[in-house]
Amino acid sequence: MTSIAHWINGRACQAEGPTAPVFNPATGEAASAVPLGGAREVNSAVSAASAAFLDWRNASLSRRSEILFRFRDLLASHIDDLARIIVREHGKVLSDARGEVRRGLDVVEFACGIPHLLKGQISENVSTDVDTWSLRQPLGVVAGITPFNFPAMVPLWMFPMAIACGNTFVLKPSEKDPGASLFLAELFAKAGLPAGVMNVVQGAREAVDAILAHDEVRAVSFVGSTPVARYIYENGTRAGKRVQALGGAKNHMVVMPDADLDQAAEAAVSAGYGSAGERCMAISVVVAVGDAGDPLVARIRERIGRISVGDGLVAGNEMGPLITREHRDRVAGYVGKGSEEGAKVVVDGRGLSIDGRENGFFLGPSLLDHVEPGMSVYRDEIFGPVLSVVRAESYEEARDLINTNSYANGVAIFTSSGATARRFQHEIEVGMVGVNVPIPVPMAYYSFGGWRNSLFGDTHVYGEEGVRFYTRAKVVTARWTGGAGHGLNFPTTK
Ligand code: NAD
């Protein structure tokens, strides 16, 4: 069985020590092994990153952006190779994996403009003959810890921005699908990135704890589930690090009675079951307002019947398996729990078997209607192809339900009324809002992040907030002429 390597100081390093299997979720077979790195691997990655930092922060902006442009071109010409690695380890269908890489590529393209993004401001003559200007400087060694569900896109949210800003980087990808990160590190090296600027340590909790404990790691970007996000935020900030920790989600889609119900049903199916519901911006709850409920559920049910589930590498399939057998069983359990708690199971995806892929981690799309806020299917992040429909009497009831949910990552409203849409975007307390758009992931030149338990920390990822997260501000005040007559008083302007 092949073993996935770490990437430290510009080269792949095969590791000794414990490993974990990496499954192909479509077949259920262990396809490779991932080393579970710990303090030793983290220490060598951080040492390499520390040693590379001074030269890299002093590299001119043109040099940094030239390397990023080359990385951009290499990535663009390898979308298919990377997408295939993702499908084999994650299970999502090939077109979806290509889409993930393209959204990551958008961030690389944004990072190519780093000379513009790092421009400061200058004020001439703040006092006679005195000028003041601001600049942003890199932090040093920074780390990223990423989830299984976007093995290329989420790392690409982080390291191109951090490195463009002049930092050096240690990435700890998900141990469930580690191949994409290694491929990205190799491509960046081919683009001319000096050794040590980008490192990948494979592993799980032990590697994460070693990152949090390491004095030289100045900042940590995390994306994953809420309990781990909270853990990273609390421990990272206690150790004096800057931390942005993005957590889980329970995204609602409000459908008003005046919405185009065909469009809304199409959107709910695509956002609920795409990538088997394993997206942090997946819609997991449809809130049907007033008399939208019955016709909407009928339309969603009809569309579910047309979803082709199977191996992501087989053309025509729209939904693949879940990431592991345990996760599939956990998600399937919610269909039973929902029924026990009083929801109506409209479509039951349990027991699905795919010819030739009987051991794959498949679960068919499932639809639960008349879900109530007290039920576990409503409260918990399920992270699978189980869509709940909650009925609400009014817009206000739908809004209050969402504003009191503990998660606040993404939300959408479907309506034909501009006034209702405007009221919603104004009143809703969620980080990313879609109007007739079910998965409102901001483009690379905005920033991504939720509110409440979906984000711990103050800055969102990528975009201009990414630049702020990965840099420190400095303000310089300078005089080159005059200056006689300093007294002991606090300086004032003249
Ligand atoms: P996870 O929290 O289990 O793992 C994320 C990372 O943390 C992995 O690298 C993992 O190795 C590490 N980790 C896991 N348990 C740990 C522990 N106890 N201590 C220290 N490190 C630990 O998440 P996942 O299952 O890989 O990903 C799915 C979750 O990520 C979902 O909750 C989803 O909503 C969330 N997610 C959020 C966003 C967002 O932008 N808010 C984006 C993608 C995924």
Image (tube, helix red, strand yellow):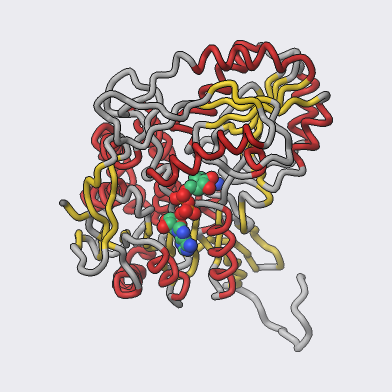
Instruction: Compare residues 313 and 173 and report the one nearer the observer.
Output: 313
Toward the left, the furthest residue is 1
Instruction: Compare residues 209 and 486 and report the one nearer the observer.
Output: 209
* Vertical relation: 424 (above or below) 51: above
Toward the bottom, the furthest residue is 488
**Residue 189, position in %: x, y?**
24, 53
**Residue 310, position in %: x, y?**
34, 26
**Residue 222, position in %: x, y?**
50, 56
Quadrant placement of the C terminus: bottom right
The image quadrant that residue 354 belongs to is top left
**Residue 181, position in %: x, y?**
31, 50
Report the residue at 24% width, 27% height from top.
Answer: 356
Instruction: Compare residues 229 and 416 and report the one nearer the observer.
Output: 229
The image quadrant that residue 69 belongs to is top left
Q: Can residue 73 be seen in this view?
A: no
* Vertical relation: 307 (above or below) 368: above
Asked whether, in this view, residue 22 is left or right of residue 443, the answer is left
Q: Can residue 483 be seen in this view?
A: yes
Report the residue at 24% width, 62% height from top.
Answer: 195
Report the residue at 67% width, 30% height from top.
Answer: 343
Report the residue at 68% width, 51% height from top.
Answer: 452
Asked whether, in this view, residue 432 is left or right of residue 303, the answer is right
Asked whether, in this view, residue 206 is left or right of residue 228, the answer is left
Toward the front, the furthest residue is 340
Instruction: Compare residues 386 and 54 and report the one nearer the observer.
Output: 386
The image quadrant that residue 206 belongs to is bottom left
